Image (tube, helix red, strand yellow):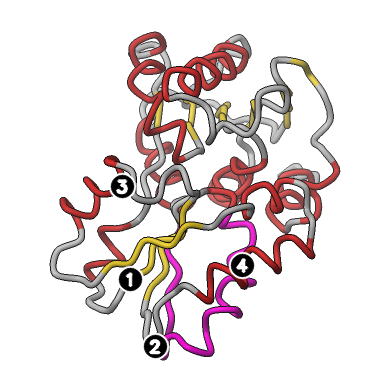
Amino acid sequence: MKIALVDSGLGLLPAAAALRRLRPDADLVLSNDPDGMPWGPRTPADIAEHALACARAAAEHRPDALVVACNTASVHGLELLRAELEPGLPVIGTVPAIKPAAAAGGPVAIWATPATTGSPYQRGLIAEFGGTARITEVACPGLADAVEYGDEAAIAAAVADAAARTPAGTAAIVLGCTHYELVEDAIRTAVAPTAAPGLTMYGSADAVAAQTLRRIADRTPTRGTAHLTVLRSGRPEPLPTPATHYPEGRLITTPVPTP
């Protein structure tokens, strides 16, 4: 079994780690775009083209499925990628977990990039899945970039800024950028003093991993070898050092014992 993941940078690590936990044998192909990141400030068409370039590079390695492990790329590029790659290669997108967060019943905050916050796409998801929940959109300028480079001071500053704009009594936080899942504990700690008891964090990695395995359940009878391939703007390179700053990065680079 071989699964490819696409993102501008390290935002693909949470989904990759979730897949590694579910299928320790799976071969992973991580295809990101250091030459073109960040994708957020680009036009929708440009984002789609960059995501497609990463997907094409990954597809050359003949994966059984491809995960678009990026909210922004899923919004602007999923249709294009599916038009080119499916049905031969199943393509799985990433959607913020607004529906389960809203269903829990308490006030919800959606932490997302400035480009996504207030966008027609996110507002559409809120309208469709938000129900009667009180939902606040919280833009997080600089947080994805700080996470990408493992800059602790910048992460702390960006998290503190967003936490200060998160309404008191918030019961759930939707992590609307895959990078944010890498600093979930820091976000929880920053928001907890003013949040409702039992604050719940909603990421997308586990759901995306489970959906990926469902999509290929009848297509991949063979086991993998837990091999890791990293493509950086199409070039085979080592995983960048900041990746190992996070438990998810360390998990996917740890050798898996042979049964």
Q: Earlier in the sequence, mark 4 or mark 3?
A: 3
Pointer 4 with pointer 3, Cβ within 8 A: no
Pointer 2 with pointer 4, Cβ within 8 A: no
Real-space Cα separation, disc 2 to disc 3, in angstroms: 24 Å
Predominant SS of the magenta segment: helix
Residue at the disc numbered 3: 122
Q: Residues within 10 Å of mark 1 (few under 14, many from 20)?
A: many
Residue at the disc numbered 1: 108
- Residue 93 higher or lower than 129, as above or below: above
Q: Identify the magenta region.
A: 180-203
**Callout 1, which amino acid?**
Val
- Image position, residue 28 (x, y; %): 64, 31
Choose between 232 and 42: the one closer to the eye: 42
Choose between 104 and 147: the one closer to the eye: 147
Residue at x 34% of width, y 50% of height: 118
Residue at x 35% of width, y 56% of height: 97
Real-space Cα separation, disc 2 to disc 4, in angstroms: 18 Å
Front of the two marks 4 and 1? 4
Residue at x 14% of width, y 69% of height: 132
Residue 186 magenta-drawn?
yes
Residue at the disc numbered 2: 196
Real-space Cα separation, disc 4 to disc 1, in angstroms: 17 Å
Choose between 102 and 168: the one closer to the eye: 168
Instruction: Say whether residue 143 is left or right of residue 243.
Output: left
Residue at the disc numbered 4: 159
**Callout 4, which amino acid?**
Val
Q: Secondary structure at mark 4?
A: helix
Residue 249 magenta-drawn?
no
Q: Residues within 10 Å of mark 3 (few under 14, many from 20)?
A: many
Say which quadrant the C terminus sits in. top right
Front of the two marks 2 and 4? 4
**Callout 2, which amino acid?**
Ala
